[in-house]
Amino acid sequence: MVISRLVLRAGAVLALLSVILSYQVSRLGRRFPTGQEVIYISNVNRIWDIQVHSLSRGLSYNLTRKIVPSSIRNWLPAWSPDGRYLVFVAAFPQYKRLLLLYDTRINYLRVLDDVGTYQNRPTWSPDGEWLAYAVYHDSDWDIHIQRMTDPNIHLIDVKITGETNDRKPMWSPDGEWLAYVSGRRGNSDLYLVNRWGYDQRRLTNGMQVDEDYVAWSPAGTHLAFTTNRDGNSEIYVVNVQTGALTNLTRHFARDYNPVWSPDGAYLVFVSNRDGDDELYMMDHFGENVIQLTHNTTLDYDPVWSSDGRYVLYISVPDLTGEIALLDLQTGNVRQLTRNDIDDWSPIWKP
């Protein structure tokens, strides 16, 4: 573990930027709509923005256009477990990417990290105490964490990995471990490290893990992931204690993007078994497979609701992605967005 004190916020430019951002947020004075909400990314005028959608009202509004300059791309949003803070990545045309923290309670935006050329994949620990993310610096990806309960969170940074190409951190459900993908041995494999940067160990060997499709089981005993090691895309699980691997899908079609149900009994995943990408569900043994969507267009990127009843996903009814909501009890699908621009990366607000 390497602990480094960051330099003061990259000088006067970033200080001025923070003042401008804070001023714009203070002018907003707007609270989130009431009722269950989801957020997603929308390609508005070729500038990526974070949209907030109220399920009860059926309305969306553009959050980032109210709190950051209009020329900035915003993506990779991550809610704190209590729903108060939103972390996201912003790309400023004249600067590198920055990691920003928005406090929805007091309408305040701050620069959280400006170290490295890029910050990527921010993820909160389950208790909201820590934030992990990947940083690209000196031609290499490393994983950093910040302790969010520290009043000086903008000054403290912990680098927990130092090998080649470590990326996509994911907290275990108990918050004690981080799983991540690393290419340090020439293959993309899964590794574990505790929150202090100790006890690093490799979980897979030569599995060609797709970093975009890895998920912890709710009990923290297994990781589901996608791999092309067998010649086509399959979904495996690995036991984090024993390292035992199980191929859940065993199908000639492309199977990918596994996500666990909140109780750990099922996984929703994406497959092109009927000729195009659709949502499917299987139990945690890989049995009892059910096709959930039946369209002639693409359906992908599923996200379970916390009660296990609904699944958010992206549907492409024409040429652009839209956000849809599937009720697993009734089978009904509700299209949340209807426009001629791409919408993607839906997540639930806690």
Image (cartoon, grey):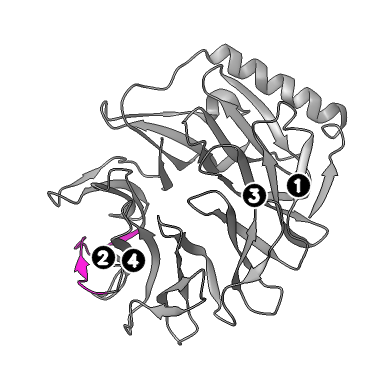
Q: Amino acid at mark 2?
A: Tyr
Left-right relation of 101 to 273: right
Q: Which mark is residue 133?
A: 3
**Highlighted magenta segment, given as a residue range:** 287-300
- Going from the N terminus, do you reach mark 4 or mark 3 first? 3
Q: CA distance from mark 4 to mark 3?
A: 26 Å
Q: CA distance from mark 1 to mark 3?
A: 11 Å
Q: CA distance from mark 1 to mark 4?
A: 35 Å
Q: Which class describes the residues within 10 Å of circle 1: few (<14), some (14-19), or many (20+)?
A: many
Name the mark nearer the viewer: 4 or 3: 3
Mainly helix, strand or loop, the magenta region?
A: loop
Name the mark nearer the viewer: 2 or 1: 1
Q: Amino acid at mark 3?
A: Tyr
> Could you tell me which quadrant the C terminus lies in?
top left
Q: Position of residue 216 (x, y in %)?
A: 46, 59
Q: Which residue is more in the foreground, 32 or 274?
A: 32
- Going from the N terminus, do you reach mark 1 or mark 4 first? 1
Left-right relation of 335 to 92: left
Q: Position of residue 44 (x, y in %)?
A: 48, 39
CB contact under 8 Å: marks 2 and 4: yes
CB contact under 8 Å: marks 3 and 2: no
Tag 4 residue? 270
CB contact under 8 Å: marks 2 and 1: no
Tag 2 residue? 280
Name the mark nearer the viewer: 1 or 3: 1
Q: Which mark is residue 158?
A: 1
Secondary-structure class at tag 3:
strand
- Going from the N terminus, do you reach mark 2 or mark 4 first? 4
> Could you tell me which quadrant the N terminus lies in?
bottom right
Q: Residue at x 52, y 76 (%)?
A: 243
